[in-house]
Every structure is written in C-alpha cells, then in structure tokens.
Image (tube, grey):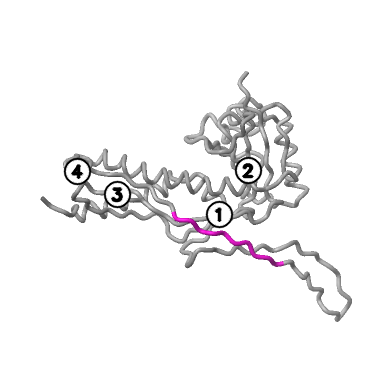
Amino acid sequence: MATTIDQAFVKQFEREVHEAFQRQGSKLRNTVRVINNVNGSEAVFQKVGKGTASTKSTHGMVPVMNLDHSAVTATLQDFYAGDWVDKLDELKINIDERQIIANAGAYALGRKADELIITELATVGSGQEIADGNVGMTLDKVLEALTMLGDADVPDDGERYAVVGWKQWSELLKIDEFSSSDFVGPDELPFRATMQAKRWLGTLWIPHSGLPVDSSDIRSCFWYHKSAIGHAAGADVATDITWHGDRAAHFVNNMMSQGSKLIDAAGVVEIKCDETPD
C-alpha cells in the first residue's frame, strides 16, 4: 500500500485551499489595515495624531506640527483546521468532493480571521456606542453614527465600512434612503447586486453572521474606517498532508498565524440593535 499521497494532488489541494481562502474565506480582512509576512509573534501598527497648520512670519521658521506618534501591537495566534481523508475514499480523486474539503478548511480559517477583527471592534468602549433603544436598525441610528464619525474627523475617503447582522440588513432594506433608486440611484440598488453588499453614505455596507449578540438579543454592529483596525499575518493559510498508517488515512491540516488590534477607537462606532423576536 502506498504510504504517501500523490504529490500532484498535494500541490493542487494546497493551491485550492489557498485560493478558496482568498476568494471567500474572510469578508473583513480587506476592510482593515493589513501587515503580511510578519516575523515573530507580534506586529506593530503606527498611530499618528492630528496635525495643526499655523502661520509664520516673513523669513520666520516654519511651524512644526509635533504630531503625536504611538504604536499599537497585535499579537499573532496560531490556528488550525484539519480533517481526515480515508485511503479508500474517493475524495482523493473526485475533484468536486476534494474542492468541498478544501473550501471547508479555508472557510473555517476565514471565519476565524473575521472573528479576530470583530473581537477588536467590540473593544471600542461605551464612548463610541449608540444604544439599542429597544429597536433594531433605524435611519436615526445611522444618521447618529454618521454624525459621530464626522465629529471625530474620520476621513470620508471611500474607506469607511459598516458591518451589520443579517437582521439589520433586512431592516436596512426597508429604509427608502438605503434601497430606493430615488435616493441612491439605479447603480447602487441592493436588490441588483450579485453579492449582499452595497455602498451608501460613502460606506460599503456588509452583512455578517458573526457579530456579537448578548443574552438580551442585542446585536452589535460596527461602522469604522479602514485605518482604525489592524490585521497581521505571520503565516497565511497553508496546508500540510500526512499519512497515518494506523488509521489508513491522510490527515489534511490547514493552518495560519494571524492577529488583530484596535488602532484608533475614534474611528469606530458601535451600533447596538435589538433582535428580540416579535
């Protein structure tokens, strides 16, 4: 009996896992600051304060802004997602079934990457929070959050993102200002999109099933700027396949080393929404 899996299969399986992770594994990784190929167990993100412009006299010295510089450190963690493939199982030669296994591992790691980002978003604190008010997502909450971001001088540069639960996404679809062509134009209608995400108020709105919900059915949604959250990867998704004779099976292990950190709380607004069943 052969004790090693065909190398062509190994290479193709590894490529499929990596491609699946890049394509569909994480919804939020591209919405935050990313550092790749980190050496060691920590990654440092630089935080720069606001500068102030001043006048100067003729031939005088140009005033110095004296920007406040600080560093935020993200600690990387190792994560694994594995499964057994029996020697006699057709998964090794059936392309469709092999892709299912590859996708499963990539999705598991993708959900973990999103979980790391969401966990850091949730540390923003009560000063950046909009109370649930015993109601779900409303236009008033959206406008209040927009005001908070504006008052904090969060850049309106096309790199704002809002991640909401599916219940809140359904509630947004009932708001004319979000879903009617009279307000957003025909090109930004959510019902025409090939995926469930749309741009509104200079922000890309994304529904997500992994947002925290407490025991009182209060869901936390987040509106943030890309620069406010950091995500670091020491090792991107990799796959290792080993033979175990005592099980007559190969163990397919998908793994990664990643971490996230809140960089600037002023760039995040937490919107709490009541999900209590009617």
Circle nearer the viewer, 4 or 1: 1
User: As drawn, which residue projects farthest toward the top?
Assistant: 278
Label 3, label 4: how far apart the Cα atoms are: 15 Å
Please give the name of the residue rendered at 67% of the width and 48% of the height, measured from the top-left corner.
124
Please give the name of the residue rendered at 72% of the width and 41% of the height, measured from the top-left corner.
129
Q: Position of residue 34 (x, y in %)?
A: 53, 57
- Asked if labels 3 and 2 touch by Cβ distance under 8 angstroms, the answer is no
Q: Earlier in the sequence, mark 2 or mark 3?
A: 2
Please give the name of the residue rendered at 46% of the width and 61% of the height, measured from the top-left corner.
234
Q: Which of 122 and 144 is in front in this view?
A: 122
- Asked if labels 2 and 4 touch by Cβ distance under 8 angstroms, the answer is no
Pointer 3 residue: 252
Above or below, 259 relative to 145: below
* Element carrying mark 3: strand
Q: Where is residue 153 in the image (x, y as percent from the top left)?
A: 75, 52
Above or below, 18 relative to 35: above
Q: Which amino acid does label 3 sit on?
A: Val
Q: Which of 210 and 208 is in front in this view?
A: 210
Circle nearer the viewer, 3 or 4: 3
Pointer 2 residue: 203
Q: Which of marks 4 and 2 is nearer the N terminus?
A: 4
Q: Is 254 a magenta residue?
A: no
Pointer 4 residue: 93
Pointer 1 residue: 260
Residue 239 appears left or right of 29: left
Give the extent of the magenta segment.
69-78
